[in-house]
Amino acid sequence: MQLKIIFNTSDVILVTLFDNPTITKWFNHFSKINSETNIYTMSVDQLPEWRTPLADDSEIHWNTILTSLEHLRSIGYNHNLTVPDYFDYNQQTLNRLHRFFTYNVLWSIDYPKTPNPFDLNFKLPKNPQMVETWYALVDPINRAVHKLENLTIPTTHASFIDTQLPMHSINFVNNYENFNEHLLIFDDSDLEQNYSFFNYNQSNLVVLDRSILGKCVLQSFHDDDDPTARDCTGRTASWGGFTIDLNSNRRKIYRSPQFRNWVDSFKLKQIPYDFPIGYVTGSSRPLLFLDRLHDQFNRVEFIGSAGEI
Protein backbone atom coordinates (compact mmCIF):
# COMPACT_ATOMS: atom_id res chain seq x y z
CA MET A 1 0.00 0.00 0.00
CA GLN A 2 1.39 3.37 -0.97
CA LEU A 3 0.43 7.02 -1.23
CA LYS A 4 1.67 8.90 -4.28
CA ILE A 5 1.71 12.67 -3.81
CA ILE A 6 1.72 14.42 -7.17
CA PHE A 7 2.61 18.02 -8.03
CA ASN A 8 1.85 20.01 -11.19
CA THR A 9 5.62 20.20 -11.75
CA SER A 10 5.64 16.40 -12.32
CA ASP A 11 7.37 15.99 -8.97
CA VAL A 12 6.31 13.07 -6.79
CA ILE A 13 6.61 11.93 -3.16
CA LEU A 14 6.06 8.24 -2.49
CA VAL A 15 4.91 7.04 0.94
CA THR A 16 4.93 3.35 1.84
CA LEU A 17 2.31 2.44 4.43
CA PHE A 18 2.90 -0.04 7.23
CA ASP A 19 1.36 -3.45 6.69
CA ASN A 20 -1.05 -3.98 9.56
CA PRO A 21 -4.85 -4.34 9.78
CA THR A 22 -5.43 -0.84 11.15
CA ILE A 23 -3.48 0.90 8.39
CA THR A 24 -5.16 -1.34 5.80
CA LYS A 25 -8.54 -0.26 7.17
CA TRP A 26 -7.49 3.40 6.94
CA PHE A 27 -6.15 2.89 3.40
CA ASN A 28 -9.29 1.15 2.12
CA HIS A 29 -11.62 3.71 3.70
CA PHE A 30 -9.97 6.83 2.30
CA SER A 31 -8.93 5.24 -0.97
CA LYS A 32 -12.61 4.83 -1.83
CA ILE A 33 -13.45 8.40 -0.83
CA ASN A 34 -10.42 9.83 -2.63
CA SER A 35 -11.33 7.95 -5.83
CA GLU A 36 -14.63 9.84 -5.96
CA THR A 37 -13.11 13.29 -5.47
CA ASN A 38 -9.67 14.75 -4.75
CA ILE A 39 -10.04 15.31 -1.01
CA TYR A 40 -6.64 16.71 -0.05
CA THR A 41 -5.01 20.12 0.30
CA MET A 42 -1.37 20.69 1.28
CA SER A 43 0.16 23.02 3.85
CA VAL A 44 3.59 23.37 5.46
CA ASP A 45 4.54 23.80 9.13
CA GLN A 46 7.31 26.30 8.67
CA LEU A 47 10.41 26.74 10.76
CA PRO A 48 10.27 29.76 13.10
CA GLU A 49 12.76 31.83 11.08
CA TRP A 50 10.53 31.56 7.98
CA ARG A 51 7.35 32.78 9.60
CA THR A 52 5.98 36.19 8.75
CA PRO A 53 4.87 38.11 11.85
CA LEU A 54 1.09 38.21 12.04
CA ALA A 55 -0.93 41.38 12.35
CA ASP A 56 -2.54 41.67 15.78
CA ASP A 57 -6.25 41.17 15.10
CA SER A 58 -6.89 39.79 18.58
CA GLU A 59 -9.68 42.26 19.33
CA ILE A 60 -11.86 40.77 16.58
CA HIS A 61 -11.42 37.20 17.80
CA TRP A 62 -11.70 38.08 21.47
CA ASN A 63 -14.98 39.86 20.80
CA THR A 64 -16.22 36.68 19.09
CA ILE A 65 -15.53 34.79 22.31
CA LEU A 66 -17.19 37.39 24.52
CA THR A 67 -20.23 37.56 22.25
CA SER A 68 -20.55 33.77 22.14
CA LEU A 69 -20.30 33.41 25.92
CA GLU A 70 -22.92 36.12 26.40
CA HIS A 71 -25.24 34.52 23.86
CA LEU A 72 -24.99 31.21 25.72
CA ARG A 73 -26.01 32.97 28.92
CA SER A 74 -28.96 34.54 27.12
CA ILE A 75 -30.43 31.10 26.37
CA GLY A 76 -30.23 30.05 30.02
CA TYR A 77 -26.76 28.50 30.07
CA ASN A 78 -25.34 29.86 33.34
CA HIS A 79 -21.81 28.60 32.82
CA ASN A 80 -19.19 29.37 35.45
CA LEU A 81 -16.47 30.39 33.00
CA THR A 82 -14.98 33.83 33.61
CA VAL A 83 -12.64 35.58 31.20
CA PRO A 84 -11.05 39.04 31.12
CA ASP A 85 -12.66 41.88 29.19
CA TYR A 86 -9.62 42.10 26.93
CA PHE A 87 -7.36 39.38 25.59
CA ASP A 88 -4.41 38.88 27.94
CA TYR A 89 -2.18 36.97 25.44
CA ASN A 90 -1.93 34.14 27.96
CA GLN A 91 -1.97 30.57 26.65
CA GLN A 92 -3.55 29.38 29.90
CA THR A 93 -6.58 31.55 29.18
CA LEU A 94 -6.92 29.89 25.79
CA ASN A 95 -6.44 26.44 27.32
CA ARG A 96 -9.45 27.05 29.55
CA LEU A 97 -11.56 28.33 26.66
CA HIS A 98 -10.60 25.43 24.42
CA ARG A 99 -11.52 22.97 27.17
CA PHE A 100 -14.85 24.77 27.58
CA PHE A 101 -15.51 24.00 23.91
CA THR A 102 -14.32 20.39 23.92
CA TYR A 103 -16.06 19.42 27.16
CA ASN A 104 -19.30 20.93 25.90
CA VAL A 105 -19.08 18.93 22.67
CA LEU A 106 -18.35 15.73 24.59
CA TRP A 107 -21.25 16.49 26.93
CA SER A 108 -23.66 17.00 24.04
CA ILE A 109 -22.67 13.63 22.58
CA ASP A 110 -23.31 11.91 25.93
CA TYR A 111 -26.45 13.94 26.68
CA PRO A 112 -28.53 13.41 28.79
CA LYS A 113 -26.47 10.79 30.65
CA THR A 114 -24.34 13.35 32.49
CA PRO A 115 -24.88 16.92 33.71
CA ASN A 116 -23.21 19.81 31.94
CA PRO A 117 -19.70 20.35 33.40
CA PHE A 118 -20.15 24.15 33.57
CA ASP A 119 -23.85 24.36 34.55
CA LEU A 120 -25.31 21.33 36.30
CA ASN A 121 -28.89 22.44 35.67
CA PHE A 122 -28.66 23.26 31.96
CA LYS A 123 -30.66 21.21 29.45
CA LEU A 124 -30.25 21.19 25.69
CA PRO A 125 -33.02 22.66 23.56
CA LYS A 126 -35.40 19.98 22.34
CA ASN A 127 -34.98 19.52 18.60
CA PRO A 128 -33.92 16.63 16.34
CA GLN A 129 -30.54 18.26 15.59
CA MET A 130 -29.74 19.31 19.15
CA VAL A 131 -26.14 18.06 19.06
CA GLU A 132 -25.43 19.87 15.79
CA THR A 133 -27.17 22.99 17.09
CA TRP A 134 -25.10 23.02 20.27
CA TYR A 135 -21.88 22.50 18.32
CA ALA A 136 -22.72 25.52 16.15
CA LEU A 137 -23.16 27.64 19.29
CA VAL A 138 -19.82 26.73 20.90
CA ASP A 139 -17.66 26.30 17.79
CA PRO A 140 -17.06 30.07 17.26
CA ILE A 141 -15.20 30.01 20.58
CA ASN A 142 -13.02 27.17 19.34
CA ARG A 143 -12.25 28.90 16.04
CA ALA A 144 -11.38 32.17 17.77
CA VAL A 145 -9.08 30.37 20.22
CA HIS A 146 -7.09 28.84 17.36
CA LYS A 147 -6.70 32.27 15.77
CA LEU A 148 -5.53 33.79 19.05
CA GLU A 149 -3.03 31.00 19.70
CA ASN A 150 -0.89 32.52 16.97
CA LEU A 151 -0.54 35.68 19.07
CA THR A 152 0.02 34.41 22.60
CA ILE A 153 3.16 34.91 24.66
CA PRO A 154 5.00 31.59 24.10
CA THR A 155 4.95 29.11 26.96
CA THR A 156 8.26 27.76 28.23
CA HIS A 157 7.66 24.57 26.26
CA ALA A 158 6.73 26.45 23.10
CA SER A 159 9.95 28.45 23.34
CA PHE A 160 11.92 25.25 23.88
CA ILE A 161 10.47 23.68 20.73
CA ASP A 162 10.91 26.79 18.57
CA THR A 163 14.47 27.56 19.64
CA GLN A 164 15.94 24.07 20.12
CA LEU A 165 13.85 21.47 18.30
CA PRO A 166 11.62 23.21 15.73
CA MET A 167 9.41 20.81 13.84
CA HIS A 168 9.19 20.98 10.07
CA SER A 169 6.52 19.00 8.26
CA ILE A 170 4.18 18.81 5.29
CA ASN A 171 0.50 18.34 6.04
CA PHE A 172 -2.25 16.90 3.86
CA VAL A 173 -5.79 17.51 5.09
CA ASN A 174 -9.20 16.78 3.66
CA ASN A 175 -11.12 19.53 1.89
CA TYR A 176 -14.49 17.86 1.41
CA GLU A 177 -17.72 19.30 2.72
CA ASN A 178 -19.70 17.45 5.40
CA PHE A 179 -16.46 15.73 6.35
CA ASN A 180 -18.05 13.96 9.33
CA GLU A 181 -19.82 11.73 6.84
CA HIS A 182 -16.41 10.26 5.93
CA LEU A 183 -15.07 9.94 9.47
CA LEU A 184 -13.29 6.66 10.23
CA ILE A 185 -13.70 5.72 13.89
CA PHE A 186 -11.07 3.41 15.35
CA ASP A 187 -11.89 0.41 17.52
CA ASP A 188 -9.90 -0.72 20.55
CA SER A 189 -7.39 -2.72 18.53
CA ASP A 190 -6.83 0.21 16.16
CA LEU A 191 -6.13 2.55 19.07
CA GLU A 192 -3.02 0.53 19.94
CA GLN A 193 -1.31 2.23 16.96
CA ASN A 194 -1.23 5.40 19.09
CA TYR A 195 1.34 3.73 21.30
CA SER A 196 3.59 2.40 18.54
CA PHE A 197 5.60 5.53 17.68
CA PHE A 198 8.90 4.25 19.05
CA ASN A 199 8.45 0.92 17.26
CA TYR A 200 9.52 2.66 14.04
CA ASN A 201 12.92 4.22 13.32
CA GLN A 202 12.47 5.19 9.66
CA SER A 203 13.36 8.70 8.51
CA ASN A 204 10.55 10.98 7.30
CA LEU A 205 7.91 9.15 9.28
CA VAL A 206 4.28 9.76 8.29
CA VAL A 207 1.69 10.09 11.06
CA LEU A 208 -2.00 10.93 11.21
CA ASP A 209 -2.54 14.67 11.57
CA ARG A 210 -3.82 16.45 14.68
CA SER A 211 -7.44 16.59 13.56
CA ILE A 212 -8.99 15.52 16.85
CA LEU A 213 -11.58 17.11 19.11
CA GLY A 214 -9.14 18.05 21.85
CA LYS A 215 -5.34 18.06 21.91
CA CYS A 216 -2.75 15.41 21.27
CA VAL A 217 0.02 14.97 23.86
CA LEU A 218 2.51 17.01 21.82
CA GLN A 219 0.13 19.97 21.56
CA SER A 220 -0.61 19.76 25.28
CA PHE A 221 3.13 19.91 25.99
CA HIS A 222 3.53 22.90 23.65
CA ASP A 223 0.64 24.73 25.33
CA ASP A 224 1.65 23.73 28.87
CA ASP A 225 -1.79 22.14 29.19
CA ASP A 226 -3.04 19.18 31.24
CA PRO A 227 -2.32 15.89 29.43
CA THR A 228 -4.52 13.97 31.88
CA ALA A 229 -7.63 15.91 30.86
CA ARG A 230 -10.42 14.01 29.13
CA ASP A 231 -9.86 15.88 25.86
CA CYS A 232 -6.14 15.06 25.62
CA THR A 233 -6.08 11.86 23.57
CA GLY A 234 -4.39 9.97 20.84
CA ARG A 235 -6.10 9.68 17.48
CA THR A 236 -9.45 8.03 18.15
CA ALA A 237 -10.67 8.61 14.61
CA SER A 238 -9.45 9.99 11.27
CA TRP A 239 -10.76 12.36 8.63
CA GLY A 240 -7.96 11.20 6.33
CA GLY A 241 -5.32 13.82 7.10
CA PHE A 242 -1.66 12.91 7.48
CA THR A 243 1.68 14.61 8.16
CA ILE A 244 5.16 13.95 6.74
CA ASP A 245 8.00 14.82 9.11
CA LEU A 246 10.90 16.55 7.35
CA ASN A 247 13.19 16.33 10.36
CA SER A 248 13.55 14.05 13.39
CA ASN A 249 12.68 16.65 16.01
CA ARG A 250 9.35 15.07 16.95
CA ARG A 251 11.26 12.06 18.26
CA LYS A 252 13.88 14.29 19.94
CA ILE A 253 11.18 16.29 21.74
CA TYR A 254 9.66 13.13 23.17
CA ARG A 255 13.07 12.01 24.43
CA SER A 256 14.08 15.40 25.83
CA PRO A 257 14.41 15.97 29.60
CA GLN A 258 11.89 18.80 29.29
CA PHE A 259 9.20 16.49 27.91
CA ARG A 260 10.05 13.60 30.23
CA ASN A 261 9.94 15.85 33.30
CA TRP A 262 6.58 17.24 32.19
CA VAL A 263 5.16 13.74 31.67
CA ASP A 264 6.51 12.59 35.03
CA SER A 265 4.96 15.58 36.79
CA PHE A 266 1.53 14.27 35.73
CA LYS A 267 2.49 10.65 36.52
CA LEU A 268 1.68 9.53 32.98
CA LYS A 269 2.68 5.96 32.20
CA GLN A 270 1.15 4.99 28.86
CA ILE A 271 1.50 7.85 26.38
CA PRO A 272 -0.31 8.06 23.02
CA TYR A 273 2.56 9.87 21.29
CA ASP A 274 1.44 9.69 17.66
CA PHE A 275 -0.29 7.40 15.15
CA PRO A 276 2.31 6.30 12.55
CA ILE A 277 1.00 5.06 9.21
CA GLY A 278 4.13 4.87 7.02
CA TYR A 279 7.26 6.62 5.83
CA VAL A 280 8.67 8.30 2.72
CA THR A 281 10.40 5.81 0.42
CA GLY A 282 10.99 8.04 -2.59
CA SER A 283 10.81 11.58 -3.92
CA SER A 284 11.72 13.14 -7.26
CA ARG A 285 13.66 15.90 -5.51
CA PRO A 286 14.74 16.52 -1.89
CA LEU A 287 11.77 16.97 0.43
CA LEU A 288 13.22 20.26 1.64
CA PHE A 289 12.64 21.56 -1.89
CA LEU A 290 9.26 19.96 -2.42
CA ASP A 291 7.88 21.54 0.76
CA ARG A 292 8.02 24.89 -1.10
CA LEU A 293 5.66 23.60 -3.79
CA HIS A 294 2.42 23.79 -1.78
CA ASP A 295 0.93 26.01 -4.50
CA GLN A 296 1.82 23.34 -7.08
CA PHE A 297 0.27 20.42 -5.20
CA ASN A 298 -2.12 18.45 -7.40
CA ARG A 299 -3.44 15.29 -5.73
CA VAL A 300 -2.83 12.18 -3.63
CA GLU A 301 -3.22 8.76 -5.21
CA PHE A 302 -3.78 5.54 -3.25
CA ILE A 303 -1.80 2.68 -4.82
CA GLY A 304 -2.12 -1.05 -4.12
CA SER A 305 -4.80 -3.23 -2.65
CA ALA A 306 -5.49 -4.43 0.86
CA GLY A 307 -2.52 -6.27 2.30
CA GLU A 308 -0.08 -5.29 -0.45
CA ILE A 309 2.99 -3.09 -0.12
Image (tube, rainbow, N blue to C red):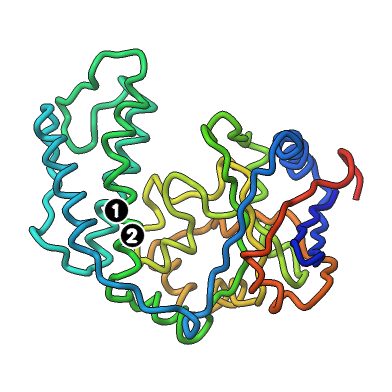
Q: What residue type is labelled 2?
A: Lys
The residue that appears at 72% across and 33% down in the rendered structure is 36
Mark sitting on residue 144: 1
The residue that appears at 63% across and 65% down in the rendered structure is 294
User: Regarding mark 1 in the picture, which secondary structure is present there?
Assistant: helix
Q: Mark 2 points at which residue?
A: 147
Asked if the residue under mark 1 is in contact with the one under mark 2, i.e. CB atoms within 8 Å, the reply is: yes
129, 124: nearer the viewer: 129
The residue that appears at 61% across and 69% down in the rendered structure is 169
Q: Residue furthest right?
A: 308
Q: In which quarter of the image is residue 255?
A: bottom right
The residue that appears at 19% across and 56% down in the rendered structure is 62
Residue 121: x, y in percent?
14, 25
Compute the Cα span from label 2 to label 1: 5 Å
Q: Quadrant of residue 93?
A: bottom left
Q: Which amino acid does label 1 sit on?
A: Ala
